[in-house]
Image (cartoon, rainbow, N blue to C red):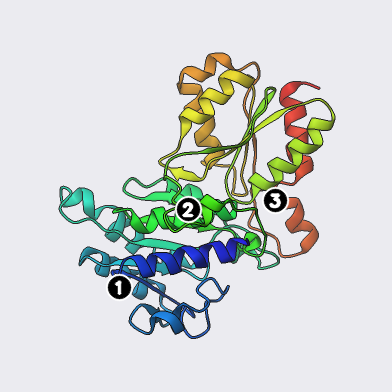
C-alpha cells in the first residue's frame, strides 16, 4: 500500500467515524488534492465535509483553528509546509497556546498536514524541513511518518487527539509502497503519538531518524550488515513529545549513536536528541561522541547534483557509522 493510499484510507475512515471531522485546504475537494491524498472524498462526503479554500493560508488555517475551538475537528492541508509560514501565527499563537492559556477549558483539536522537507527540484523556498520549527513549540504535537503504517496510524491518532497536531509528511514518499499488516488495514488501527518504533534491531550502533531518512538508514544498515556491523534503526515517528526512552535503551545496548535528518543542522532534531542523551542516564553508556548526519547548512540549491549533495545520502550514513565506530 502506498503512503498516499494509507493517508486516503485514514481520512476516509475518520470522516466516516466522526461527523465533526472535515477537511479543508487548497485543491482538496474537486481536484482530489494537489497530491491526490483526498481522492474520492469530495464525491463521497460533499461540500460540507471537504472544502476547497482560496489561496490564503492565514485565512483557512484561522478558519480551521476557530472551527476546532467551536467543537469541530478540522484537518487543514497545506500544499506544502513551506506555505504554513504564512499561517504560523495561527498555528502557534491561536492553536498551540490556547488550551494552556484557557487553563484547559478550550481544547483545539485541529490537524495541520501536508508535505514537509525536500521534494525534487523545487528550489530553496519549497524544500525546508519544519520538524525543528514546530517541535520547538509547547502546546503542539508534531508527528513525522515514514511508512504507510506510520502515515495511516499517526493521521488517525492526530485526528482523534484533542491537541493541535502538526503532521509532517514527505512528498517523495507518497508513491512509495510499503507492506501493511492486516491489523494496520483495520478501521481501529492507530499509532500512539509519542512512541518511536525500532525498525531493525542491532547491537553495534543506534541510528535515529524520522520521515524519509529512516529509509536511508535501513539501506545503510543493510550495506553495513555485509561488513559485520549491525545497526539498530529507530524510526522516531513523533518529534514532539519525543520518545527519548527508546533511544536511551538502545544506546545503553549499542554504546554508539548516529542521528539522521533532512533538515538543517543548527538547533535541529538531531541536536535535541544529542542534548537529551548527554543530559540523561544513557550518556555514561556512550563509547564515542554522538554524530549528526543532516542536510547541508545552506538554502536548498535547485540543480539536481547540488540538491543530492545537500541531503543526507546512504553513503553519508555509512561514513558516519564508520567514524563513530572508528573503523
- Which disc, if any, is residue 153? 2
Q: Position of residue 55 (x, y in %)?
A: 44, 80
- Which disc, if any, is residue 311? 3
Extreme-front residue of the structure: 182
Relative to 214, 49 lies left or right: left
Q: Earlier in the sequence, mark 1 or mark 2?
A: 1
Looking at the rendered image, the disc whose residue lies closer to the viewer, 1 or 3, is 1
173 over 133 or under it: above or below = below
Q: Position of residue 78 (x, y in %)?
A: 47, 69
- Which disc, if any, is residue 63? 1
* Disc 3 crowd, CA 10 A, few/some/many (<14, 14-19, 20+): many
Q: Is residue 296 visible?
A: no
Which type of secondary structure does the marked residue at label 3 adopt? loop
Which type of secondary structure does the marked residue at label 2 adopt? helix
Q: Are marks 2 and 3 in contact (CB under 8 Å)?
A: no
* Disc 2 crowd, CA 10 A, few/some/many (<14, 14-19, 20+): many
As measured in the structure, the alpha-carbon distance from the residue carrying label 1 to the one carrying label 3 is 35 Å
Amino acid at each position: 500500500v502506498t503512503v498516499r493510499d494509507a493517508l486516503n484510507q485514514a481520512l476516509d475512515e475518520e470522516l466516516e467515524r466522526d461527523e465533526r471531522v472535515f477537511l479543508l485546504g487548497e485543491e482538496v475537494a474537486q481536484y482530489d488534492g494537489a497530491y491526490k491524498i483526498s481522492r474520492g472524498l469530495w464525491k463521497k462526503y460533499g461540500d460540507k465535509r471537504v472544502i476547497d479554500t482560496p489561496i490564503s493560508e492565514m485565512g483557512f488555517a484561522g478558519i480551521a483553528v476557530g472551527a476546532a475551538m467551536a467543537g469541530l475537528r478540522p484537518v487543514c492541508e497545506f500544499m506544502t509546509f513551506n506555505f504554513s509560514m504564512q499561517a504560523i501565527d495561527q498555528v502557534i499563537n491561536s492553536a498551540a497556546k490556547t488550551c494552556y492559556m484557557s487553563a484547559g477549558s478550550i481544547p483545539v483539536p485541529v490537524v495541520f498536514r501536508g508535505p514537509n522537507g525536500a521534494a525534487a527540484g523545487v528550489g530553496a523556498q519549497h524544500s525546508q524541513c519544519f520538524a525543528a520549527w514546530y517541535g520547538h513549540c509547547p502546546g503542539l504535537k508534531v508527528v513525522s511518518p515514514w511508512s504507510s503504517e506510520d502515515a495511516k496510524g499517526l493521521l488517525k491518532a492526530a485526528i482523534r487527539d484533542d491537541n493541535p497536531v502538526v503532521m509532517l509528511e514527505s512528498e517523495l514518499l507518497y508513491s512509495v509502497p510499503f507492506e501493511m499488516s492486516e491489523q494496520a488495514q483495520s478501521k481501529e488501527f492507530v499509532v500512539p503519538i509519542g512512541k518511536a518504533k525500532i525498525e531493525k534491531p542491532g547491537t553495534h550502533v543506534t541510528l535515529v531518524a524520522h520521515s524519509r531518512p529512516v529509509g536511508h538508514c535501513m539501506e545503510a544498515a543493510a550495506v553495513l550488515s555485509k561488513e559485520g556491523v549491525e545497526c539498530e534503526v529507530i524510526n522516531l515517528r513523533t518529534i514532539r513529545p519525543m520518545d527519548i526512552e527508546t533511544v536511551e535503551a538502545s544506546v545503553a545496548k549499542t554504546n554508539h549513536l548516529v542521528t539522521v535528518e533532512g533538515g538543517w543542522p543548527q538547533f535541529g532534531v538531531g541536536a535535541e536528541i544529542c542534548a537529551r542523551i548527554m543530559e540523561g542516564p544513557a550518556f555514561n553508556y556512550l563509547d564515542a561522541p554522538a554524530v549528526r548526519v543532516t542536510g547541508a547548512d545552506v538554502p536548498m540549491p535547485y540543480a539536481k547534483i547540488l540538491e543530492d549533495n545537500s541531503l543526507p545520502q546512504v553513503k553519508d550514513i555509512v561514513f558516519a557509522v564508520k567514524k563513530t565506530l572508528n573503523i
